[in-house]
Amino acid sequence: MSRPAYVVDASVAAKWVLPEEDQSRALQLEERYQDEEIDLMAPSLLIAEVGNVLWKRVRRRELPLPAASRCFQQLLKDSPILLDSADVSLSALHLAIAHDQTVYDCLYLAWALEQRCDLITADEHFFRAMRPAFPCVHLLKDFPP
């Protein structure tokens, strides 16, 4: 029997390594993945996006460089299954144009559609914009643990 699978976006993964609102929910999800109860997937873009969040925190002097490095190493160690495909990237572009959202955000949705699973995001703007057309999009704070 296969495990439930979900796509997570960078807004969720950032909470695995940084103290943010709803971090406990994100950590519960990550723990279930580490315990092999569920599968978590994301486009490889997730690594760069979380790295960019860490860079911004260092630049704003909200996080010292050694702490940012530790956070990034932890993310690399515990990352979800990373996915890449030109075909899915093209689908993301089409979703972005059709729904007036960024290609970055739509790449996560395109993967959820490709994998026939749910997308979990902490990005309320993206959730509100996409949920009516895509019931597979779930907000982290409302997602069952």
Image: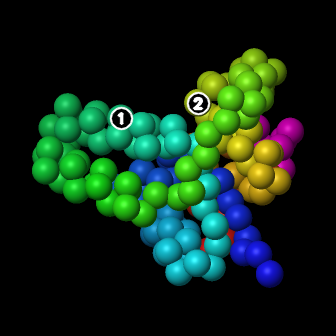
Q: Residue at x 28, y 33 (%)?
A: 56
Amino acid type, mark 1: Asn
Disc 2 target residue: 104
Residue 18 circle label: none
Q: Is residue 52 left or right of residue 10?
A: left
Q: Residue at x 75, y 30 (%)?
A: 87
Residue 17, position as x, y percentages in the image: 35, 58
Q: Nearer the viewer, residue 18 or 84?
A: 84
Instruction: Relative to 103, say whether 71 is above or below.
Output: below
Amino acid type, mark 2: Tyr
Disc 1 target residue: 52
Range drawn in magenta? 130-135
Where disc 2 sits, the SS reads helix
Instruction: Relative to 64, say whether 89 is above or below.
Output: above
- The magenta stretch spans residue 97: no
Which quadrant is the N terminus positioned in? bottom right
- Between the residue at mark 1 and the residue at mark 2, the CA separation in whole angstroms equals 13 Å
Instruction: Relative to 134, say whether 60 is above or below.
Output: above
Q: Is residue 3 left or right of residue 116?
A: left
Residue 10, position as x, y percentages in the image: 50, 45
- Mark before the other along the chain sequence, 1 or 2: 1
